[in-house]
Structure formats: structure tokens, C-alpha cells
Image: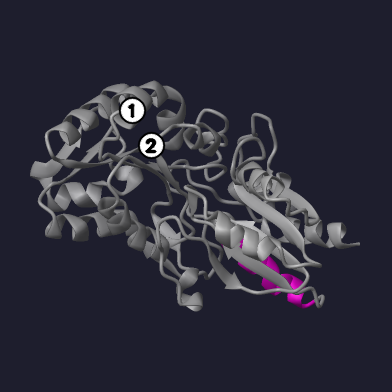
Amino acid sequence: MSTAATKPRLKTSAMIASIAGDGQATRAAPFGNALVALARERSDVVGMTADLGKYTDLHIFAQAFPERYYQMGMAEQLLMGAAAGMAHEGALPFVTTYAVFAARRAYDFIHQAIAEDNLNVKIACALPGLTTGYGPSHQAAEDLALFRAMPNLTVIDPCDAIEIEQMVPAMAAHHGPVYARLLRGNVPVVLDEYDYRFELGKAKLLRDGADVLIISSGIMTMRALEVAKTLAHDRIDVGVLHVPTIKPLDTATILREARRSGRLVVVAENHTVIGGLGEAVAAVLLSHGVTPAFRQIGLPDAFLDAGALPTLHDRYGISTQAMADTVKTWLR
């Protein structure tokens, strides 16, 4: 038998690949289930999508509340305009699509129809950053940079299933437009070990460390926690500051942790290094005269390859082992 025949194949799904590792605990469709729970308490909640109900877990809401579910077809600009109209009439629309379609195809409609009027529209978008192997047409590597620049818009990048479940009612309680990155399907459970509670606009120190502080959001917090455990074997003490709200940024907590002397500060994000969390944190530190040793881990300023997610995460330096190796290099 040839080597090629016996070599294990890395598997990735076209559209519903999970980012969970082998044996990692997951919860199915936390966004869809949380939205159903919210809708049972609030009759103004409606679900809207552009032909992507199944791929954003909104189909669960559609099954529970078919009369409050709006399928707009493959027309993301129409979707955002209709959501604005719903909000004007007193509804609370939760809108789903892919992050690339919201950030690139419907940006002007979100800007003019939703954000300018500060409407109560909640936009939850799947496939953020490098969470699909479909290549540049579906990889939203620059969505945070675009949406951070939009006035009135709150921006969230959740870590795991627990945070998504807690994020949904918090989005509803906040008046004004919200953009949230969405993990869907079988979503990892990570934050149960840390007595975590999501608070809009608040960063949380999940673990302390004397040598390195990793400031992270989204799936990179999961990676950062794995890196901390990995580097502990090398007697490198890593702290992890989770920043789920990208805008408004919790500057007070970031400054408090970054001011502690003797630590390398690393910002890790599933986003291009241009315009995302890394540059936001760097601006905060510089404007307040806080100057620790500072590095970024993120996606390059490039159109990314297509392929299996484990391969791509290694290639672009956002896998656990790649991150651990990079941090050790910086500490030499």
C-alpha cells in the first residue's frame, strides 16, 4: 500500500465545519437556541436572513416561530434595508448572513439605513476571519476593520458557545445597532472553566501570567488559553485577557493589565493585522503613554488560500502550536 493511500486526510466541510478540536466539548447551534429562548420572552423579536438560515443556525428560530421568520433570498442589501424598516416599525430584527456579505456587499446599506438612524438592528454573521476553507470569496478577514469605523455600531467577537448564548440577550438589551461575529453548528465550549459572564463593553482576565499577556477575542481566546497551557510546560507563565467587545473597547482594563511591568503583550486575533483589535489596542497604549514590548498575531494583509482549516491555521500562524512557537521565539 502506498504512503499516499495510508496518510490521514484533513477534513473540512464546505459550509458547516466546526472549529472544535478532537474530543472537545461542543454545543449545537447556540445562537439559534438562544434566539428562540429570547423570542419566547419578547414578542418583538424577528429573524431575518438572505438564503442562509441553515448555515447561520437561524433555521431553529424558523421552526419555532415561522410567522416571525423572514427569508429574503440572496439579496443582502435588501435584507438590511428590510431590517431597517422592521426596526422603524418597532420590531427587533436579528439578521444573519455571512460576514463577507455584510461587510463587503451590504456595507453601505448598514451604514445609511441602519447605523445613521441608530436603529435597533442586530446583525450576526457567520464565517468570520479564517473559519472557512472556501478562500477569499468567503473569508471575512477585514470585517472588524470596516465595522469599527462605522459610527453608532457596537462590535462583538465571541469566543465560544457559552458566550454566544449570553451575548444574544445582551444584544437585545442594548439599544442601537450591533454587529456580532457568529460561530455556528457544533461550537466549542471553553469558558465554563473560568466562571465567565459576558458583559457588553467589558474585557475579562481569564488567567493571570507573569511572563506574557495575550489580549485576544473570538476563537483566538480559545487558542490563547491552549497556548497558556502548552507554554506552562516550558515554565512560561501566560495570562489571557479576553476582549469580546471590539467596539466600544474596554480601555481601562486593557491599560491596567498592560501597565504591569516585565510582560510581553501579544494581541491575537482571527482578522487581518490591519485595522482590527491589534491596532485598536496599540492606539490605546500609545495614546496613554503605555509602552510594553508589543507584538501581534493575526492574519496577513493578503488574500488567503483555500483549503482545510487545520492546514490554513498552521500556515497563517493562528493554530495553537504555531502561536506557542511564535511566542517562544519572541521571548528569546
- How many angstroms separate mark 1 from mark 2 (CA)? 7 Å
Identified at 47% across, 48% down, the residue is: 248
The stretch in magenta equals 222-233
Label 1: how many residues lie within 10 Å, few (<14), some (14-19) or many (20+)?
some
Identified at 44% across, 36% down, the residue is: 99
Q: Does residue 224 appear in the picture of this structure?
A: no
Mark 1 residue type: Glu
Mark 2 residue type: Asn
Farthest residue toward the front? 288
Identified at 12% across, 49% down, the residue is: 65
Q: Is residue 287 above or below residue 110?
A: below
Q: To which residue does mark 1 refer?
A: 116
In the rendered structure, the answer to whether residue 85 lies left or right of residue 99 reads left
Our reading of the magenta stretch's main secondary structure is helix
Q: To which residue does mark 2 refer?
A: 152
Secondary element at tag 2? loop
